[in-house]
Amino acid sequence: MQDAHMSTRTDLIKEIDAFLRETGMTPTRFSVLVGDRTLMVSLRGGRDPKSGTIDKIREFIAKERATRAKRGPPPRQSRAA
């Protein structure tokens, strides 16, 4: 069963990392917003997430994506020469 946990954790970390790249959010900020300030450090350190934690993470990501989609892309910033 250890392999299933490792696969779940690895897949979850990949999902989170994709979200972080997409949003530019730091792992620390993500962890705080999800409600567990040590989340990313713990997951990367080998902690197996409980199903409730996985659900909470995926719910947060879905809500953030929906909110960002409603706002639209950020305005482009001009660069001064």
Image (tube, rainbow, N blue to C red):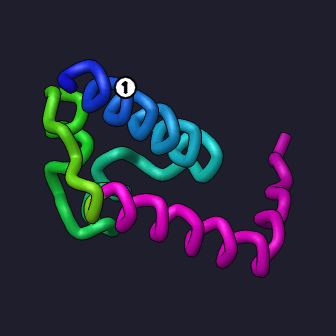
Q: Which residue is mark 1?
A: 7
Three-letter code for the amino acid on which mark 1 is drawn? Ser
Tally the marks: 1
Magenta residue span: 54-81
Q: Quadrant of the C terminus?
A: top right
Residue 19: say if magenta: no
Q: Position of residue 41 (x, y in %)?
A: 18, 37
Left or right: 13 in relation to 52: right
In the figure, 33 relative to 8: above or below? below
Q: Is residue 16 above or below residue 5?
A: below
Q: Position of residue 7 (x, y in %)?
A: 37, 26
Q: Is disc 1 surrounded by few (<14), some (14 to 19) or many (20+) residues within 10 Å? A: few
Q: Which quarter of the rendering shows the N terminus?
A: top left
Residue lying at 23% horizontally and 69% vertically, measured from the top left: 35
Residue 19 drawn at (x, y percent): 56, 47
In the image, is residue 1 above or below residue 78? above
Q: Nearer the viewer, residue 59 or 70?
A: 59
Question: Which residue lies at the image location 36% right of the left edge and 67% below the top edge?
Answer: 56
Name the image quarter holding residue 21: top right
**Mark 1 element type:** helix
Q: Is residue 19 left or right of residue 72?
A: left
Q: Nearer the viewer, residue 28 or 16?
A: 16
Q: Name the dominant secondary structure of the magenta segment.
A: helix
Q: Nearer the viewer, residue 21 or 59?
A: 59
Residue 38 spot, x, y in % from top left: 15, 50
User: Residue at position x 36%, y 35% from top?
Assistant: 8
Q: Is residue 68 above or below residue 76?
A: below
